[in-house]
Image: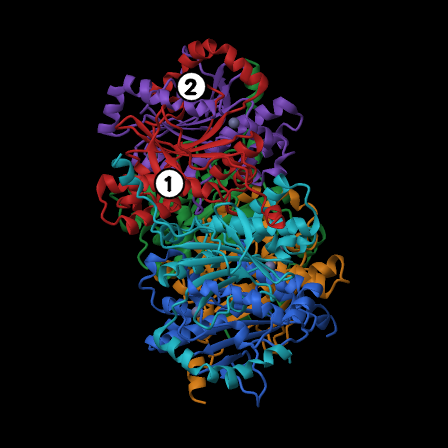
Chain colours: A orange, B blue, C cyan, D red, E purple, F green
Amino acid sequence: MNELIGRVFHFEKSIFPAHGELFGKLTTHGQEPKALMISCADSRIVPEQIMQAQPGDLFVCRNAGNIVPPYATMNGGVTSTVEYAVAALGVRDIIVCGHSDCGAMKALSDPTGLEAMPNVAAWLRHGAAAEHIVSTCHGELEGKERVRAISLENIIAQISHLRTHPAVAAAIARGEMTLHGWFVDIHAGQVLGLDGDSGEFVALREDRDLPVALAARTRIATEFAEAAE
Amino acid sequence: MNELIGRVFHFEKSIFPAHGELFGKLTTHGQEPKALMISCADSRIVPEQIMQAQPGDLFVCRNAGNIVPPYATMNGGVTSTVEYAVAALGVRDIIVCGHSDCGAMKALSDPTGLEAMPNVAAWLRHGAAAEHIVSTCHGELEGKERVRAISLENIIAQISHLRTHPAVAAAIARGEMTLHGWFVDIHAGQVLGLDGDSGEFVALREDRDLPVALAARTRIATEFAEAAE
Amino acid sequence: MNELIGRVFHFEKSIFPAHGELFGKLTTHGQEPKALMISCADSRIVPEQIMQAQPGDLFVCRNAGNIVPPYATMNGGVTSTVEYAVAALGVRDIIVCGHSDCGAMKALSDPTGLEAMPNVAAWLRHGAAAEHIVSTCHGELEGKERVRAISLENIIAQISHLRTHPAVAAAIARGEMTLHGWFVDIHAGQVLGLDGDSGEFVALREDRDLPVALAARTRIATEFAEAAE
Amino acid sequence: MNELIGRVFHFEKSIFPAHGELFGKLTTHGQEPKALMISCADSRIVPEQIMQAQPGDLFVCRNAGNIVPPYATMNGGVTSTVEYAVAALGVRDIIVCGHSDCGAMKALSDPTGLEAMPNVAAWLRHGAAAEHIVSTCHGELEGKERVRAISLENIIAQISHLRTHPAVAAAIARGEMTLHGWFVDIHAGQVLGLDGDSGEFVALREDRDLPVALAARTRIATEFAEAAE
Amino acid sequence: MNELIGRVFHFEKSIFPAHGELFGKLTTHGQEPKALMISCADSRIVPEQIMQAQPGDLFVCRNAGNIVPPYATMNGGVTSTVEYAVAALGVRDIIVCGHSDCGAMKALSDPTGLEAMPNVAAWLRHGAAAEHIVSTCHGELEGKERVRAISLENIIAQISHLRTHPAVAAAIARGEMTLHGWFVDIHAGQVLGLDGDSGEFVALREDRDLPVALAARTRIATEFAEAAE
Amino acid sequence: MNELIGRVFHFEKSIFPAHGELFGKLTTHGQEPKALMISCADSRIVPEQIMQAQPGDLFVCRNAGNIVPPYATMNGGVTSTVEYAVAALGVRDIIVCGHSDCGAMKALSDPTGLEAMPNVAAWLRHGAAAEHIVSTCHGELEGKERVRAISLENIIAQISHLRTHPAVAAAIARGEMTLHGWFVDIHAGQVLGLDGDSGEFVALREDRDLPVALAARTRIATEFAEAAE
Ligand SMILES: [Zn+2]
Ligand SMILES: [Zn+2]
Ligand SMILES: [Zn+2]
Ligand SMILES: [Zn+2]
Ligand SMILES: [Zn+2]
Ligand SMILES: [Zn+2]
């Protein structure tokens, strides 16, 4: 038997009982997660570990490449998960989280070998903007540097997709949504955050403000601003 | 015979010969349009009239509601026209142009009657964010005020969709793309422009800077900015 | 500032006031366009110029290649615009208008270079019949002659697509729809029209009947014709 | 055991051996069917019986409602079967065959009960033009008369879809394709055929020409006809 | 005139009258088919001949390659036909029937030549599992042996798709559905049937039980079984 | 600032350094996850906690309702993640993991309120088989019992979808894939596992064999088994 699979017994016997009070509260009151995290399926990136989150803290959507397809008439899992998080659970923070050494980003950078994975290839078209930007703006980059640049641009691209989803767009307009773009460098043990104003990814540091991709800000109602002129 | 259709003879006999030099140049050198305009199919909104454009000036995409579906694996006419304008023609200005009294926006505001037009209904889902924003942020608006608010938010939504298209995203990253959001008020004879910084639509006036939805600006290369810290 | 963009001020200051009465009527009574024109996004082809149309005359759909996807469960902008024109506005004439030196038709004829424009490539699949016909029926054609032949066949193909749209099919069956297929030769300053009976494109001339792709004609009710035998 | 299923033994023991020569030839030379028949899945309509066809004679596509979706970028079984028949097998006659008392057509006429069959409902959207024509042109029809009218118009609609398929369109342009629209009235034991010129369905009779929906006819090459003027 | 097409007169004059009583009953009572057969469009495989079926016995869906796309939000003809057979007609036996020398399976085995048939190529993606299995598990097979192996695996794959359709899945859970996988070898005049338990295809023989892909069997209600522990 | 978001600093300062050796190995050798887990986005269900997994152990796909769309030509995130896990990483165990009190399953059971979440509604169509089975086989169930039954059937349905994916189907045929269907009851602190042979969900207990939905088993090559008869 797969040794990993067998560890589930330990959950039942030890872990669950040890968290009895928490699980009791979570089943009685239901979940009220504080954020939605969209991250990669990569086994090395455990959202709850990075966020130091307990059960109940973090609504999580994971897929190869931490992709968010733009909103469209064609429905899918990410779209539904985003809609549920915002419309049903009232989540006000969404983190798109990429990482170093990502297999999906490497494939976006160099599609050799994707012929055998046609669906991965098609899925990665949602990262086409990232690849296109790096190829046309930083054509000189190669290898790991190119992959890293694409990974960062991919986070920006997915946040741009996220903003096309009606529930997200409306929460932004109401000033009730903060968007975060993070990059976990598992080599350096460092987390970078996108500063939406400057377009830079900067290291998260406790001694300075957390950079955000888009800060919650009430938009001046277009209608009335003009009328008041 | 439809009287309008018959007027085509006039084009051949008088208009074309009168613009002989211009058409000669345009056929010899090909087109080099200065902007892409995405506007409504509405018969009252003639892009070339609003822009005072000559043949050769303006690449034009028109559909009901001046909609730009977000970039996706599902292809369509607007996506292709945007791609062609930016990738093949090198256009550096894109104008999304809405207008007052728009039938599509009225239907988005009040879908009564859309059962008989299932495709219009489906197409308008691309404006769902606009309707959702106005309904949840300005629930008190009704009638013409609600339609106007939705029309303005729809322009913002379509610009947000436009930014998901790889060719546009890359041109933005290179600092080579300016996006414009205009609203033609055919009752007041006034054109409003979106100021992307404040989120307001303001009247275009010759005596002040043209408001832009997104100004062309070279983005600091994320990769190197961080490295240089 | 893009010099073209700045010309909009002129519209507000001079053009709109000069057409005050017309725009006043159009905003009071709404639009009642006399025809729907589906034409290319090409900057050199201005539908209102070719038709000598005033604001309010012509409902216009424009995209790269003057394409009309066949009616299907997958919705898009052309389908919606056609549905709105026929079902909501009661339009009874539809013109599919192609033109010479069309970039889309050149790409259909020779796809070299389309790898960089995957969406244009996908969109042009709606013209596959045209390319297939010319390649199999007129395999000897090359260069400009091949492009011209494909452009003409493309107009026929799009009209054939147009007939699959329920609103159009029903209007045809009621004898209330005339379809037109036009080709604007901007080199020769000539407009050709499809004669649906002979399958030929002939020059439009004031001294002979306007050729139509499909004339409005009440169809003999299939049900009763047979019953009366 | 399902009694019908058991009858297969009879095929092996008696039928196959009795047709040994025919099957031998068909396996040695491969199939060369003389026509493609697109008919309903209805158990009462056996294409080979109606056509008095032997194995090898008839390439057959069957689905609920003898539907042919219009050609589109979205692929399906009918599209592929049509393409294979024309491009790989060189079929030059296609018959779209509807019939009386068709469950699909009844559901198109009166969708009550379709909530439990969402896919049938969606599939029948490909017959929307037929329903729309009958509702707007013959609003007075009810019950069986309405179903019959829709069934006939559905055949016309599917033939119109068929013409949008590139392989079919090209074969038509080459003058190598004849299209047939048939209606099998299983109550009257009568087969009607669409006369494409008049738009009528007329009884097939041995003593008069077979009516065809579209006769094979070489189209005058558009390019050269005009040039020769 | 196509000689085959003309044979239809014979149906009206001789065949229909000869089956007057059967057709009378079928029009009065409607159809109650005993099984749904999903088979190839191939002209040499006549489902009613193989099953020795009379009009009214067999609901039939035919397409190139006897494909059943998996259930999805994207609708098509096979999905609808399956839904109608099970939900509207109450069919309790479904046969997926492949055959030897199948053009579709040959194309799945060796896609050379499919460039000219893009839709067939796309449709055959629904058989990708079959090709993938044979290529990775039996990489040593070539030519006819490879085609045969793919044809058999394709039947298994399509049955696996069939089980994803809600109406089928529910009938299975109720113990009211038997699935059959057959392979007609038209060279040997033999019919093989899939034994779902062993995964083998075995010759159908009157002197032993009919092998079934999935036998009708009431599933132990998961809910109560556990509760009763 | 959202208090949860701020905890990320702790990861950098304490957690990452404490796991230095593990992360070092994982970045040097890349990931080699032992299983793919497809589970719900629900914040209370942390896959790594239930499996007692370390970084590097578990490839994880999460979405609302632990859905696996069936393989189709329409691509999405789950399909790509499955393909990547099996084809690129060689995963041989896939766990579909549902849970009690699931918001998605409640919505599948009672769609009231889903009008405001059209994408969740569309996504849940992939669980239609589960709802259909419970409604038709256990129509007497209500409330929590109905939701629980649907949640269990949904796991079965998603495993059935999983088997349509070519990479999974081929691994099954090679005898290299074990499928698991788990249900985490967060009220009882119990994990149930699907026994594919009996169709029951049984409690996982250390003192008896782990139930599996589908055991890895080399399939007898259909081709040769029959030939050897
Ligand atoms: Zn990754
Ligand atoms: Zn408008
Ligand atoms: Zn053009
Ligand atoms: Zn029928
Ligand atoms: Zn076949
Ligand atoms: Zn859940």
In the displayed structure, F91 sits above or below D100; it is below
Residue B21, position as x, y percentages in the image: 67, 71
Q: Is residue B76 above or below residue E211?
A: below
Q: Specify the amino acid type for callout 2.
A: Ile
Q: Amino acid at mark 1?
A: Ser
* Residue pictured at 46% horizontal, 62% vertical: B5
Q: Nearer the viewer, residue A113 or B112?
A: B112
SS type, badge 1: loop
Decide: is D3 above or below E106: above
* Residue B90 can be seen in this image: no
Q: Relative to residue A110, is residue C182 drawn left or right? A: left
Is the Cβ of the residue at disc 2 closer than 8 Å to that at disc 1?
no
Left or right of A64 on screen, residue E82: left
F198 vs A114, left or right, is: left
* Residue at mark 1: C-beta within 8 A of ligand 4: no
Q: Nearer the viewer, residue E11 or F38?
A: E11
Q: Which residue is mark 1?
A: D198
Chain under numbered label 2: E
x, y percent for residue A206: 61, 75
Q: Which residue is mark 2?
A: E50
Image quarter (top left, top right, bottom left or bottom right) of the C terminus of chain B:
bottom right
Label annotation for residue F157? none
**Image spot of residue C32 (x, y percent):** 38, 68
In depth, the one of E95 and B178 nearer the eye is B178
Please, what secondary structure does the residue beneath circle 2 have? Answer: helix
